[in-house]
Amino acid sequence: MLAVLIVSQLGLGKYMTGLTFYHPWYHAAPRLHKGMGLVIAAMALLRLTFRLRSGIPTFRDFIVSLRYNVYGVQHLLLYGLILTTATAGFGFATSAGDPVPFFGLFEIPSPFILGKKGGELFDAVHMILASALVVLIALHSIEKMRLLLSRRRSGGH
């Protein structure tokens, strides 16, 4: 679910940057993008919390099942990248002191005002991290599919 939302977010983000002021989606697309970004951040934070609370393997278990744990480390890094990307997006969205709307239900106020230069920096970081995230999700998905297909061929579980 997170992967689909994130890839959709990148598409929406790319689409909305090319809109003109008089386009019907000029104001709606950023609001949707911000709301979806908050949902993605909340989902990632909940999933990461659940994952960490469900028990981290002991060092011996880590060594014995190194391949499994490499996948676990990959997931933790992906969640970290998701949250970092969302934080950079939030920093960009609130850099002028504007709150971030959540689908018209409520708004999250800006914790600080960064100004134009700070906003531009957060925007650039957000774009780079979002693009990297989509690439990593694609690579991770390909690896998962490869693993699934190799298990089916070998008759394993």
Image (tube, rainbow, N blue to C red):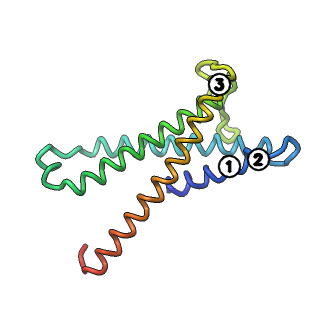
Quarter of the picture holding the C terminus: bottom left
Left or right of 155 on screen, residue 145: right
Three-letter amino acid code at disc 1?
Lys
Q: Residue at x 73, y 47 (%)?
A: 16
Question: Do the residues bearing badges 2 and 1 touch, measured as CB atoms within 8 Å?
Answer: yes
Q: Which quarter of the picture shows residue 130?
A: top right
Q: Which residue is mark 2?
A: 18
Location of mark 3 (residue): 95
Residue matched to label 1:
14
N-term mark: 2 or 3 = 2
Residue at x 19% of width, y 53% of height = 66
- Give the x, y percent position of residue 8: 61, 55
C-alpha separation, residue under disc 2 versus residue under disc 3: 21 Å
Give whichever of discs 3 and 1 has the lower sequence position. Answer: 1
Q: Residue 79's mark?
A: none
Where residue 132 appears, as percent x and y from the top left, is 50, 47
